[in-house]
Image (cartoon, rainbow, N blue to C red):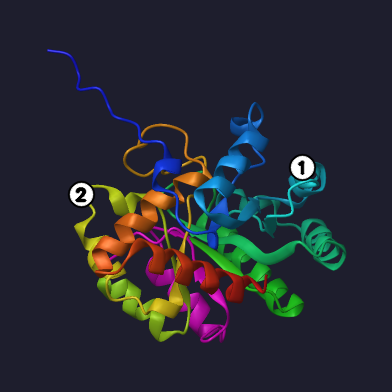
Amino acid sequence: MGHKKIQRIDPLTMALPVGGVDSHAHLDGPEFDADRDATLDRALAAGLARIGCVFLNPGDFTVRKTLFNARPEVFFLLGIHPCEGRFCTDEALSAMRGAFAHEPRLKAVGEIGLDYHWKDCPRETQIAAFTAQLDLARELDRPVALHCREAEEEALAILESRGFKNYPLLWHCFGGGKGLARRILANGWHISIPGPVTYNGNAGLREAVAVIPADRLLLETDSPYLSPVPWRGARNEPAHTVFTAHAVALARGESPEAVWLACGENARRFFRL
């Protein structure tokens, strides 16, 4: 017996009003070299007004930001990912400082944090890179986009001990339950929901989504990763945010249009767009 064919749905058939924001996407990579402009055109047609492109080191930012010279809907985030913590040198931090000083489209320091799932970067190195970039974000008065995987307690402890309660911080790619969500919210932070909220096995995430206040909730794709149903297993792209919005709306008992526009406004306020 053959496998059941997956029915891919065109996201434009589920387009929402203009005003949505994909708060986190990696659009500078080779996955989009063949059709980057067409991908961004689809995003706009699906109802996105802004898209946050995340650069993972200052060298890539310097070279690749020019890919978006003609795309004003794209804003930028810049940070050294925890798995690349060994590259968070004084020189790299200086380069980041210069980038933020000269590029008005740079809106946040991120994604930074801790990732204990992969074993290719020692924990001590990750923590040093994380804390150095937290200091930089505070120095620059920029929001933080947090990456945290299998390191929630340590990340929370670092942030809380360093006085980041009520600092503008976005917990990127949230995948936890209500308990973690409530602790994040108690610190005054925001939560961004990715495509896996659409997966059948993620009932706990949908329960968490239902308790997040409407003014603390954002949407993201993390493109080209973490495609929502019905594109799971394929390349993700910003237009697919509409599927996430529909799933979040169902979990909250709200209309997709209301969720879409509220999350978009939250993103504009958080990133000072």
Q: Disc 2 on helix, strand or loop?
A: loop
Which residue occupies 74% across, 54% down?
72
Q: Is residue 51 left or right of residue 67?
A: left
Kindly identify the amino acid type of the residue bearing the numbered disc 1.
Arg
Q: In the image, residue 171 lies at what x, y percent? A: 47, 67
> Which mark is on residue 64?
1
Rendered-image quadrant of the C terminus: bottom right
Q: For the residue marked with disc 2, what is the amino acid? A: Gly
**Magenta residues, start to end:** 148-177
Query: What residue is at 20 percent from the left and 19 percent from the top?
Result: 3
Quarter of the picture holding the N terminus: top left
Q: Residue at x 62, y 33 (%)?
A: 32
Q: Can you say whether 198 is above or below 20 in the image?
A: above
Q: Indicate the position of residue 46 as horizontal and vertical percent values.
A: 50, 48
Residue picked out by circle 2: 201
Nearest to the observer: residue 150 or residue 12: 12
Residue 158 part of the magenta segment: yes
Residue 44 picture location, percent across and down: 58, 49
Which labelled disc corresponds to residue 244? Answer: none
Q: Quadrant of residue 230?
A: top left
Mark found first going from the N terminus, 1 or 2 = 1
| Residue 151 occupies quadrant | bottom left
Badge 2: how crowded within 10 Å, few (<14), some, or many (20+)?
few
